[in-house]
Amino acid sequence: MLWEPDNMKKFAVASAAVVLMSLAACGEQPAAESNNATNEVVVDELANATNAVDNAANAVANAADAVNATNAANAAE
């Protein structure tokens, strides 16, 4: 659904890109505020993607630790 946070961010990025491209097509210079707002959204998206990758890596590491603990317990028997 559009109102979910991730979809809203994607919609905001797409909308900002459309506005900037239409200004470029008309030969107009976009306002600094538009550029800054777009850059902030993109930076936020990249930060979120980085956090998601870190979280996935942590989950894999935790799963590996659990497997190692299970293997150690089985070896001790």
Image (tube, rainbow, N blue to C red):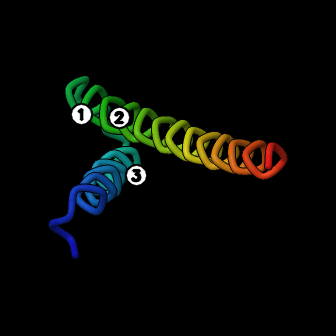
Q: CA distance from mark 1 to mark 3?
A: 16 Å
Extreme residue in the bottom direction = 1
* Residue at point 51%, 36% (across, down): 50
* Residue at point 28%, 60% (across, down): 11
* Residue at numbered disc 2: 44
Q: Mark 1 falls on what kind of element?
A: helix
For the residues carrying marks 2 and 3, which lies nearer the camera in this image? 2
Horizontally, residue 9 falls left or right of residue 59, namely left
In this rendering, the answer to whether 44 lies above or below 1 is: above
Q: CA distance from mark 2 to mark 3?
A: 27 Å
Which x, y percent locates residue 53?
Answer: 56, 42
Query: Of the residues under marks 1 and 3, which one precedes in the sequence?
Result: 3
Query: Of the residues under marks 1 and 2, which one precedes in the sequence?
Result: 1
* Residue at numbered disc 3: 25
* Residue at numbered disc 1: 34
Q: Mark 3 falls on what kind of element?
A: helix
Query: Of the residues under marks 2 and 3, which one precedes in the sequence?
Result: 3
Horizontally, residue 10 falls left or right of residue 3, namely right
Report the number of discs: 3
